[in-house]
Image (tube, rainbow, N blue to C red):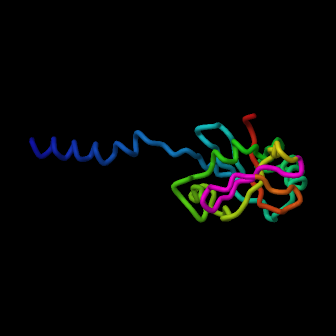
Amino acid sequence: MEFKKIFLFAAILILMPCLCFSSDFTDNGDGTITDNKTGLMWMKETADNKMNWKDALSYCENLDYAGYSDWRLPNIKELGSIVDYSAYNPAIDTNFFPDTMSSYYWSSTTYSYGAVDAWRVYFDYGSGHGPGNKSNTYYVRAVRGGQ
């Protein structure tokens, strides 16, 4: 009888983390990822080509993907919300965003000290949130929902 109690206790200890903790993300199986904390839906893949800020805005706004046509370029707060500061090269959960480049990604947020710049996030170490000239080319990941 004592052995059964010990076995049951051990099984609970082993399984409890699986029951109590859920992932921050859900893979929807259609090329999209839902952030369970923010409710935002992300395009799983990075856009095929780097682009300047104006083209990045247009690309996202004209995207018809996974049955949705309301995609947009994320603002700086949204883009920063998917950074995983415990990871690097890239600083993101690659189980859900496997092709993320360890490089800069555009946000839709114009830099307040100069309209020629917009905020970007550096997904190598997750640092480097800062302005980039809108004519530069960086990577893009579309989002929908929120705002």
Residue occupying image coordinates x 82% and y 50%: 118
Residue 120 part of the magenta-drawn span: yes
Residue 122 part of the magenta-drawn span: yes
**Up-down relation of residue 47 to residue 29 (above or below):** below
Q: Position of residue 109 (x, y in %)?
A: 80, 44
**Up-down relation of residue 6 to residue 105 (above or below):** above
Inspect this view and state whether residue 31 appears.
Answer: no
Residue occupying image coordinates x 74% and y 37%: 145
Residue occupying image coordinates x 79% and y 46%: 67
Per the rendered image, the range of residues in magenta is 115-130
Front residue of 80 and 8: 80
**Up-down relation of residue 54 to residue 146 (above or below):** below
Q: Position of residue 84 (x, y in %)?
A: 57, 52
Q: Position of residue 99 (x, y in %)?
A: 66, 63
Quadrant of the rendered image containing residue 81: top right
Q: Position of residue 48 (x, y in %)?
A: 79, 64
Q: Where's the C terminus, which quadrant?
A: top right
Inspect this view and state whether residue 141 appears.
Answer: yes
Residue occupying image coordinates x 89% and y 59%: 135
